[in-house]
Structure formats: structure tokens, C-alpha cells
Image: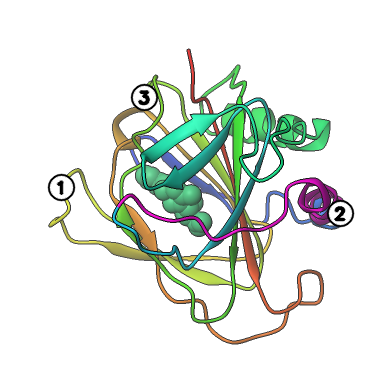
Amino acid sequence: HAERLGPGTVLLHGYALERAPALIAAVERIIAASPWRQMITPGGQTMAVSMSNCGPLGWISDRRGYRYVPLDPLSGQPWPPLPPLLLRLADEAATAAGFPGFVPDACLINRYAPGTRLSLHQDRDEEDFSQPIVSLSLGLPAVFLLGGASRNDKTVKIPLLHGDVLVWGGPDRLRFHGVQPVKDGNHALTGPCRLNLTLRRARR
Ligand code: MD3
Ligand code: FE
């Protein structure tokens, strides 16, 4: 079922469950070409989350800052293409949440080992905040923290389970958010990790 979490935020419980095995196989093919890496923040810290990308653009962080780039810096080659399965899921989920015609040009893939967290932040490296973001959770569960427009606003905890799809846009697009440390566990399809795929429109 669909759960409204804010004026522009909808959580689609179990929306991708049937497609999860195919989606995980697609991630494995992407990772064979553009492997997991821990990026460096502009401040020089190694990020705890391992990341890769697919699609025309990929999000990266290094000493020079955060940005979207067409080539994987590890290979010098384009990021692997967005699997049609993923494009279809993004469009269907965005439409179900009230954002028809969503065509992402970037997909960031996050891998959380047990103990890994993502501190509170905003997603603001994209050119067009009128476009929604679609995020897919696979594998181990996590507690997502949804804040407000200011860093100091109180946060609500939202469990994200295998197969859940979260869509947010409109007035919620710039809300602060993060992920609490992932608990130990082993998932039948992903093993000891949580995967999150975040589909975005980075360029107009
Ligand atoms: C609701 N990823 O990659 S996705 C990120 O689970 C990121 O890996 C998290 O934040 C993850 O930037 C969370 C779900 C999400 C992301 C941003 C939101 C939900 C949101 C922004 C506003 C409201
Ligand atoms: Fe984010």
C-alpha cells in the first residue's frame, strides 16, 4: 500500500518485491563494470557507504566537491547504462506517487554493511528541484530519518524494508534526511548488506 509521509512524499510498501531478484542481478552486472568504492568528502573523510552509479550521469564526491559526471573516474569509461527494468520501476513508482513522466538521468547505488550510517543531509546537487527522486531499498532493513527544511528540525523514523520504494518531490524535495546504522543481519538475496538505489534527474 501507499503511505503518505508528507505533501510530496509517498512510501510504496513492498512495491518492488516481485522484481527484487532481477533488480539485484542488474546491480551485480553494474558492479562488475563500475565496482563499489568509498568516496572521499571534500573535507577529506572517507564515506562509510560504498557507492557506484548507472545511467548517463553518476554522483561523485572527492576533494574538489560533490557533482554529477558522465564517466566513472575509476575506469574513465561511461557509467553502465540504466537497466530498462529500473527505468520502468522509476516511472511507475513516480506516477503512482503523483509525479508522471519521470525520466531519471542518474542512479546512485549505495551499499550499507552492518554498522554503516548516512548522516543527515539534503540532496541539492541537481539542477532541477521540481523533479522528484525515487529510492529503492533492497536487502537488510534500515531506519530512515526524515527531517524538515532546516537541519535542526526534528526527525521522524521510518523503517525501510526490502522492496520498499520511496518517492519524494515538490515541497519535500529539499528535506534533510539520513539513515541510522544498519543492524547486523544476513538477507537471503543480498547477504550481509542493504542496497539503496536512488534515481534522480540531475540535469535539465
Ligand atoms: C525523503 N540515500 O543517496 S534514500 C542519498 O537510503 C540518500 O541510501 C538514502 O539519502 C539511502 O542521497 C536515503 C531515501 C530518501 C532520500 C532523500 C530524501 C528519502 C528522502 C529527501 C527528502 C525526503
Ligand atoms: Fe540523500
Does the segment drawn in magenta span residue 70? no
User: From the viewer's perspective, is residue 156 above or below residue 140?
Assistant: above
In the picture of the structure, the residue carrying the numbered disc 2 is 25
Does the segment drawn in magenta span residue 23? yes
Point out the residue furthest to the bottom here: 184
Beta carbon of the mark 1 residue lies under 8 A of ligand 1: no
Please tell me which residue lies in front, 195 or 148.
Answer: 195
Q: Measuring 33% from the left and 49% from the top, which residue is drawn there? A: 42
Q: How many residues crowd around disc 2 within 10 Å: few (fewer than 14), some, or many (20 or more)?
A: few
Query: What's the amino acid at mark 3?
Result: Phe
Tag 2 or tag 1, which sits nearer the N-term? 2
* SS at mark 1 in the image: loop
Q: Measuring 30% from the left and 63% from the top, which residue is drawn there? A: 156
Q: For residue 106, what is the image quadrant? A: top right
In the picture of the structure, the residue carrying the numbered disc 1 is 150
Per the rendered image, the range of residues in magenta is 22-42
